[in-house]
Amino acid sequence: MKLAEEGPVITSIRIAEAPSRRSRRPRVRCAIELDGRPWAVLDGETVLREGLKAGARLDPDGLAALLRRDEVIRARAAALRRLALQPRSAMEARRCLLASGFGEAVVDEAIAALESEGALDDAALARRWAARRRRQGDFAPARIEAELIARGIEPTVAQRVATGSAEPDLIGDCARLLLRRRSRFEPLAEAPNLDRVRAFLARRGFEPEVIEAALARVLGEAYVEPDAPSD
C-alpha cells in the first residue's frame, strides 16, 4: 500500500479473529481503525504484504484498491482450503469461490494467482485422474475423457491423458471388467442378460465393437453375434 503525506491515519490494528485450532490453514483477521474510526477488517496476510502499521498515513485514493487486493487474498486462501481437502480443476475451484460469494473479477485474479503458483494445475490433475481410472480398469478412455472434460479440463488435454502414451488394450480392459462383474449378469449367455451387460459396458464408455470382442473372449464357443439391425 502506498503511504501518503496526507490522508487517513491508521490509529490501531487489532486482531478481530484468531486462528481456529481446527482449521488446516489458520487465518488471522485484523480490524483496522482510520482516524479513530472503524474502517475495515482485513486478512492478516494483507496487513503484512501491504506493510500496514499504526501511525501510517494511507493514500485516500488507494483505499478501494487495498480492499480489492484483500478480497483476492481471501479468495485465494479459501480456494487453498478446499484444495487441501480435495484436488480440483480451475473450473471447479472457480465455481466454489463464486458460490461462496466472491465476485467474478476477484475470483479470476485468485485463480490466476493459484495457477501461476502451481497450486492449480489442470494437466497434472488430469494425469492423476486418468491414471487412477486406468488402475481401476473399469473405464474406457472415452469415458475417462468425458469425465475430464466435465471437470473443466481442455478437450485436447483430456483426450491425450485419457488414452495414455501407450495404445490401450480396450478389449482386455472390457473383458476384465466383465469378468469382475459377471455374477451380476448370470447366466451370461442368455439374451436378456447379454442385453443388460452390453448396456452396462456401454455406460462405462466402451464402443460396441469392443464390447462384442470382449464378450466373444469371455464366452468362447457360447458367444453368438447379435443380429444386425434391420433397415
Image (tube, rainbow, N blue to C red):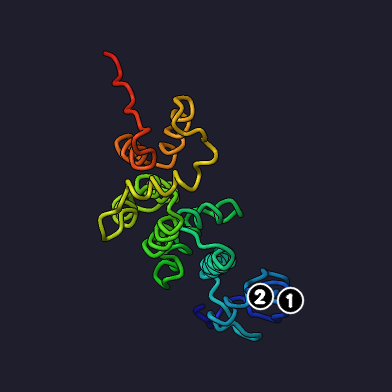
Q: In terms of depth relative to the viewer, which is nearer, 120 or 13? A: 120
Q: Residue at x 44, y 55 (%)?
A: 133
Horizontal and vertical percent for residue 219? Answer: 38, 38
Q: Which residue is mark 2?
A: 26
Horizontal and vertical percent for residue 147? Answer: 43, 48
Name the secondary structure under disc 1: loop
Q: In terms of depth relative to the viewer, which is nearer, 1 or 98? A: 98
Q: Is residue 70 above or below residue 226?
A: below
Crowdedness near tag 1: few (<14), some (14–19) or many (≥20) residues, C-alpha within 10 Å: few
* Contact between labelled residues 1 and 2, with CB atoms less than 8 Å apart: yes
Q: In terms of depth relative to the viewer, which is nearer, 164 or 68? A: 164
Horizontal and vertical percent for residue 176? Answer: 41, 49
Name the secondary structure under disc 2: loop
Q: Which of the numbered marks, if any, corresponds to residue 21?
A: 1
Q: Residue at x 38, y 62 (%)?
A: 127
Left or right: residue 5 versus residue 116 is right
Q: Amino acid at mark 2?
A: Pro
Left or right: residue 183 versus residue 195 is right
Q: Amino acid at mark 1?
A: Arg
Q: Using the rendered view, name the quadrant where residue 55 is placed.
A: bottom right
